[in-house]
Amino acid sequence: MAEFSIAEVRVLEKRPSRSASLGSRAPNAIVGVAILIAAEMMFFGGLITALLVLRAGAVIWPPPGQPRLPLVATGLNTVVLLGSGLAMWSATHSLRANHLASFKHKLDLAIALGTSFVLVQGYEWLGLLRHGLRVSAGIYGGIFETIVLAHATHVVAGLIALTLVSFRARHSRYSSRSSGGVDACMLYWSFVVLLWPVLYVLVYLV
């Protein structure tokens, strides 16, 4: 039988176990989403910077002849998207409490509200296109379309992820002890939801 000195025993006692180190490590999905969000923040930061530079260099903003943006409808739609984010946040808390039925219901609510946001935004966007607000119409139309469509693309990607999570939830893939995928999805969705009010203020109101 191997014998250990007092110094070796103390070293072994201080060394963390493999299970403990793995338990404190963030899930790979969350780390990956965090890296993605950091990249997306730089991307949208570039778009916002371009918008501010173009606006500062313009004598009149928006330029004459451009259609008026639907401020009230988009403002109400912003509340709908924020409601989707709140529903997703509440769903994750229900999952941690192991209230699986409530988790699935709130997750479906988040998807429904997010889908409503996309449909309303699409309807408004098509209306603006019919009234001449296009990329080819000038700098104003180009930067508007780029920012709005970029965010809409991210919302659709988030809805796909939420739908996948909902499908897995219906097959009992998640629990209070197994929620890494849900937490990663919630992190991404929170970014998409909280980004839109900033874009709404900068693009529609300022």
Image (cartoon, rainbow, N blue to C red):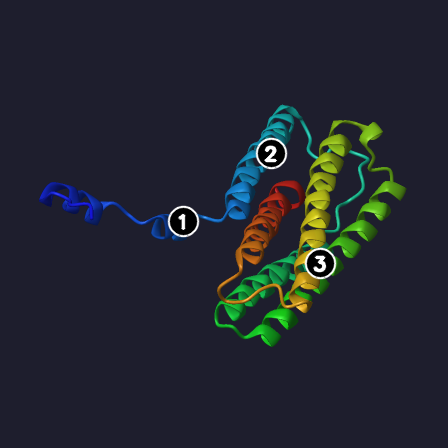
For the residues labelled 3 and 1, the Cα–Cα distance comes to 29 Å
Tell me if residue 152 comes above or below residue 146 in the rendering. below
Are there few (<14), some (14-19), or many (20+) residues within 10 Å of tag 3? some
**For mark 2, what is the residue?**
48
User: Farthest residue in the left direction?
Assistant: 6
| Depth order, front residue of 185/134 | 185
In screen coordinates, is 21 left or right of 114? left
Numbered mark located on residue 163 in the image: 3
As helix, strand or loop, the secondary structure at mark 2 comes to helix
Name the kind of residue labelled 1 in the image.
Leu
| Mark 2 vs 3, N-terminal side | 2
The image position of residue 149, as x and y in percent, is 74, 40
Question: Badge 1 is on which residue?
Answer: 22
Q: Residue at x 58, y 29 (%)?
A: 49
Instruction: Say how many tags the image has.
Output: 3
Considering the numbered disc 1 on the image, is that residue within a helix, a strand or a loop? helix
Sequence-earlier tag: 2 or 1: 1
Q: Give the percent coordinates (x, y) of residue 27.
A: 49, 49
Residue 203's disc number: none
N-terminal-most mark, 3 or 1: 1
Mark in the foreground, 2 or 3: 3
